[in-house]
Amino acid sequence: MKKRPLKKSTLIVIATVVALALVVATLAMLNGRDQLRAGVGIKDGSFRLLSSNETTMVTLARLQKLPARTVTVTLDTSTTTARQVSYTGLPLRELFTGLGVPFTRDNYCVARGSDGFTTSYLADEVERDDIWLVYAQDGKALPGRSQNGFGPFLIVTRGEQFSQRWCKYLQTLTVK
């Protein structure tokens, strides 16, 4: 039995399907790279610190090697009544210094949580120690999102009513 050659239209359809598959694969790869850069998929025990084209994975163990302090702030949300809460952590200024991340008055930083919330902090807020990275409340580790908590890492803004710029579930912290 003799094989018939493929028609020109069939070859065009096959080439189009292959080209589309390559485009989809390329877009999926680029999207995955962008999500990795943004911190999507980071496990509960770390967050990504991005600065000057450098990426540093910050774990709880690494943070606990830096001098910890306690900050007491008012937690007031739309679902809770105002109350004083003590957190353990350190001001962002001390975090940057402790990890060797350059931060000047020309910089600002952007925090992003795994829930997609993003907020920014100006250099003068960081310099005044108004912005804190915390990892414990009342001496206990902050529970993560899967345990209905705010952690394991939370950015707290001192003196801000209603905690509207607090960043729970911290996933990436970018110095710009």
Image: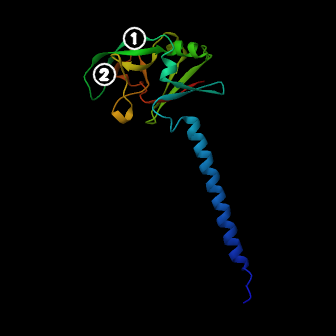
In the rendering, at what x and y percent does residue 109 appear? Answer: 55, 23
Q: Nearer the viewer, residue 160 or 80?
A: 80
Instruction: Look at the picture and state if 3 lies above or below 55.
Output: below
Neighbour tally class for label 1: few under 14, some 14-19, many 20 plus, Cα within 10 Å: some
Q: Quadrant of the C terminus?
A: top right
Residue on which disc 2 sits: 76
Q: Residues within 10 Å of mark 2 (few under 14, many from 20)?
A: some
| Residue located beneath label 1 in the image | 70
Residue at screen point 60% across, 19% down? 107
Q: Secondary structure at mark 2?
A: loop
Looking at the picture, tell me which residue is in the foreground, 131 or 37: 37
Work out whether residue 88 can be spotted.
yes
Q: Nearer the viewer, residue 11 or 123?
A: 11
Q: Amino acid at mark 1?
A: Thr
List x then y, in percent, for residue 75.
Answer: 32, 20
Colour mapping: rainbow
